[in-house]
C-alpha cells in the first residue's frame, strides 16, 4: 500500500510523464487579465474535440488530454475578454499563466444581418502612421484637471453609402482601459454641424496597440455622395493617479492634406489645423440614401442592452469585492457570496444573468440609508461558486436564496430583483411565500417568448459553439428555455409587487404589462427612454420609486 501511495503522490506532483500514465498528458495553468488578476470561471477547451473544462474562481484550470492532441492548441475564453489560443506544447510541468486581453468595444457580436452585405467602400486612408499625437493624447490630459480634448478629422464621402465601421489606430497604451465617446457629424465649411448619432457611441480601449474597430451598422447611417463626415473621439476622465507611469497615444500621420479637428470642451469652438491628423478611416456599403423625409430607424432593444452593458457608469465603491463586509454561505451544490450594508429591515438584492453585486452600485448606498441591504452573487457569478454541472432553472436559483435566508435566520424579507434576479424573486415568492414580504421586479418575464426576437436569435447563435456542459452554455440555455409561467400561475400570489421596465427593454412591453396585470394589486411603471439597464440609466428616479413603494416617503 505504501508503494501504491507513493506512486500516486509522484504522479500528482507531475514527476511522471504523461506517457507513463497511459498515453495521456496534463495541462495546467491560470487565466489572468492584463493586470495579472485571475479571470474566474474561464472556459478552457481544445476546439473540435469536445474536451474542455472551466477554471475555478481563482482562474486555475487542469485538463487531462490524450497524447494524440499534443500538436493541438488550447483556447481560453470568458465574458468580457477576447479568446486566447495557446499551443499545448507551451504547457510544461509548472502551471502556465495565460493572459486574456479585455475585448475592445465592437458591436459586431450583436448585429444580426439578414442577406448579404454590399462590397465595402473605404472612406479615408488606412495608411501607416509616421508620428505620434503626443501633444493630444497622453496621461496628463486624460487625468489632469484641465479635462480631456475632443479630437478627430474630416473624412469625405465619395459616393452614396451606408456607414459600416469606424477604425482608429492606437500607438501605445499603458492604461488598463481608456474610455471615449465617438462622435460623427455632418459638416459645413469643414466644421462639424449636426450629430449623426445623438449622444455619441461609447468606446472602451483596453488593447495596448493596433487598430480599434467600432461597428456602426446598427445605426443605419446613410449618407449622400459629396457629404463629408467629421469623426472625433472625446476622451473621458481617467481615475488613474500615477501620471508618470501611464500613457495613451494615438497614431497620427503628417502631410499637407491632413487636417486635425480639436476642441477643449463640448461647448467650445472647433479648431481646424492642417499638417497632421489621427490615423483613422470609415468603411461603408454602397447604397442609395433614404428619401429626405424618412426618419432613421431607432436602435433595437437588443442594441440598447448591449451598449449599456458595454459602457457602465463609474463607481468609486468596491461593491462585490469587500473583504470586510463579504460572507459566504453554503447551499446545495453551491456557495453563495453576499455583502451587507446599512441597518433596519432586510432588503435582498438579486442581480441579473452575467452580472454580480457590483451591478447595484448605483442603488446600494441609497437603499442602505433605510434598510439592511443584503446583496448576493448568484451561483457561478461574482464570488459565488457553482459546484455542479446540472441544468439551471429559476426554481433552483430560488431554492438557493431560500437556503441563504434560512442560514441567516430571515423571514418576510423585501426582495428587489433585476432581470434573472427578478425571475428568481418571482419563483421564490411562489415556492416559499412565507419568506417574501414585498417584491420589486425589474425587467422580469414569464417565458422566453417575452424577449426581443433579435436577442433570442443572438443567444441561439452564441449557444451553438459552446461545450454543452460548460457554465456559459448552461446560462444561455436558462435564458432560452426558462421561465415557464402563465398569467394564471400568479393569481394566487398575495404579496405587494412593483413591476418596473424600460421603454426600450429587451422584455417586450406587452409581456411586462401582462405580468403586472396577472399579479393581484401590482403596480407598474415604464421608464421613458430607458432600456433593460434602467437602474444605471435613471438611478435617481429608479431609487426614489423603489423606496416609495417600500414605504419610504420621498424627501
Image: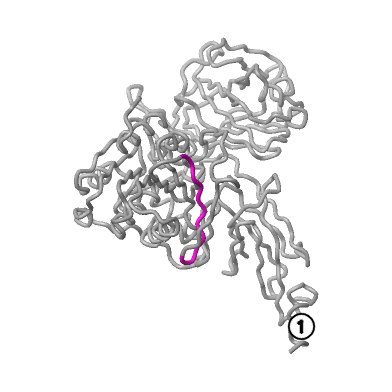
The vertical placement of 288 against 410, above or below, is above
Q: Nearer the viewer, residue 547 or 93?
A: 547
What is the quadrant of the C terminus in the image? Answer: top left
The vertical placement of 417 against 542, above or below, is below
For the magenta stretch, what is the residue range? 332-342
Q: Residues within 10 Å of mark 1 (few under 14, many from 20)?
A: few
Q: Residue at x 62, y 16 (%)?
A: 262
The vertical placement of 233 against 35, above or below, is above
Which residue is tagged 1? Answer: 7
Q: Nearer the viewer, residue 555 or 193?
A: 555
Left or right placement of residue 112 versus residue 508 in this view = right
Q: Nearer the viewer, residue 484 or 508?
A: 484
User: Is residue 337 covered in magenta?
Assistant: yes
Whole-percent x, y for residue 420 in the image = 39, 51
Specify the principal SS of the magenta part. strand
Q: Residue furthest bottom?
A: 1
Whole-percent x, y for residue 105 in the image = 56, 39
Report whether residue 452 is seen.
no
Left or right placement of residue 344 versus residue 381 in this view = left
Left or right placement of residue 311 versus residue 414 in this view = right
Report whether residue 170 is seen.
yes
SS for callout 1: helix
Amino acid at each position: 500500500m505504501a508503494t501504491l501511495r507513493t506512486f500516486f503522490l509522484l504522479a500528482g506532483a507531475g514527476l511522471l510523464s504523461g506517457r507513463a500514465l497511459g498515453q495521456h498528458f496534463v495541462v495546467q495553468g491560470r487565466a489572468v487579465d492584463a493586470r495579472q488578476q485571475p479571470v474566474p470561471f474561464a472556459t478552457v477547451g481544445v476546439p473540435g474535440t469536445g474536451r474542455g473544462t472551466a477554471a475555478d474562481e481563482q482562474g486555475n484550470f487542469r485538463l487531462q488530454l490524450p497524447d494524440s492532441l499534443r500538436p493541438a492548441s488550447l483556447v481560453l475564453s470568458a465574458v468580457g475578454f477576447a479568446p486566447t489560443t495557446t499551443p499545448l506544447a507551451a504547457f510544461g510541468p509548472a502551471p502556465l499563466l495565460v493572459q486574456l486581453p479585455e475585448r475592445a468595444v465592437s458591436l459586431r457580436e450583436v448585429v444580426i444581418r439578414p442577406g448579404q452585405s454590399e462590397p465595402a467602400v473605404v472612406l479615408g486612408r488606412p495608411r501607416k502612421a509616421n508620428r505620434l499625437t503626443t501633444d493630444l493624447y497622453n496621461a496628463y490630459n486624460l487625468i489632469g484637471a484641465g479635462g480631456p480634448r475632443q479630437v478627430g478629422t474630416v473624412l469625405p464621402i465619395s459616393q452614396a453609402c451606408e456607414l459600416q465601421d469606424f477604425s482608429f489606430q492606437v500607438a501605445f497604451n499603458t492604461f488598463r482601459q481608456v474610455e471615449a465617446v465617438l462622435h460623427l457629424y455632418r459638416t459645413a465649411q469643414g466644421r462639424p454641424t449636426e450629430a449623426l448619432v445623438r449622444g455619441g457611441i461609447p468606446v472602451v480601449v483596453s488593447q495596448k496597440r493596433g487598430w480599434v474597430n467600432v461597428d456602426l451598422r446598427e445605426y443605419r447611417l446613410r449618407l449622400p455622395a459629396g457629404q463629408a463626415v467629421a469623426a472625433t473621439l472625446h476622451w473621458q476622465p481617467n481615475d488613474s493617479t500615477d501620471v508618470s507611469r501611464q500613457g495613451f497615444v494615438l497614431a497620427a500621420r503628417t502631410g499637407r492634406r491632413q487636417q486635425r479637428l480639436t476642441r477643449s470642451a463640448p461647448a467650445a469652438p472647433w479648431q481646424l489645423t492642417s499638417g497632421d491628423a489621427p490615423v483613422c478611416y470609415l468603411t461603408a456599403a454602397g447604397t442609395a440614401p433614404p428619401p429626405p423625409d424618412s426618419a432613421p430607424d431607432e436602435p433595437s432593444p437588443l442594441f440598447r442592452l448591449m451598449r449599456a452593458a458595454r459602457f457602465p457608469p463609474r463607481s468609486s465603491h468596491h461593491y462585490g469585492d469587500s473583504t470586510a463586509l463579504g460572507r459566504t454561505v453554503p447551499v446545495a451544490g453551491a456557495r453563495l457570496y453576499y455583502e451587507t450594508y446599512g441597518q433596519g429591515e432586510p432588503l435582498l438584492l438579486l442581480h441579473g444573468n452575467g452580472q454580480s453585486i457590483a451591478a447595484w452600485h448605483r442603488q446600494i448606498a441609497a437603499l442602505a440609508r433605510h434598510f439592511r441591504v443584503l446583496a448576493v452573487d448568484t451561483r457561478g457569478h461574482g464570488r459565488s461558486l457553482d459546484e455542479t454541472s446540472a441544468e439551471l432553472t429559476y426554481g433552483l436559483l430560488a431554492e438557493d436564496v431560500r437556503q441563504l435566508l434560512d442560514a441567516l435566520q430571515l423571514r418576510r424579507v423585501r426582495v428587489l430583483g433585476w432581470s434573472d434576479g427578478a425571475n428568481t424573486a418571482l419563483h421564490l415568492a411562489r415556492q416559499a411565500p412565507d419568506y417574501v414580504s414585498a417584491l420589486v421586479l425589474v425587467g422580469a418575464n414569464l417565458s422566453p417568448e417575452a424577449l426581443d426576437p433579435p436577442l433570442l436569435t443572438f443567444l441561439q447563435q452564441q449557444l451553438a459553439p459552446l461545450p454543452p456542459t460548460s457554465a456559459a452554455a448552461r446560462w444561455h440555455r436558462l435564458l432560452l428555455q426558462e421561465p415557464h409561467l402563465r398569467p394564471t400561475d400568479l393569481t394566487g400570489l398575495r404579496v405587494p409587487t412593483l413591476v418596473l421596465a424600460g421603454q426600450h427593454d429587451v422584455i417586450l412591453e406587452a409581456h411586462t404589462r401582462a405580468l403586472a396585470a396577472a399579479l393581484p394589486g401590482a403596480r407598474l411603471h415604464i421608464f421613458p427612454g430607458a432600456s433593460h439597464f434602467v437602474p444605471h440609466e435613471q438611478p435617481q428616479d429608479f431609487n426614489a420609486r423603489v423606496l416609495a413603494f417600500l414605504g419610504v416617503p420621498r424627501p
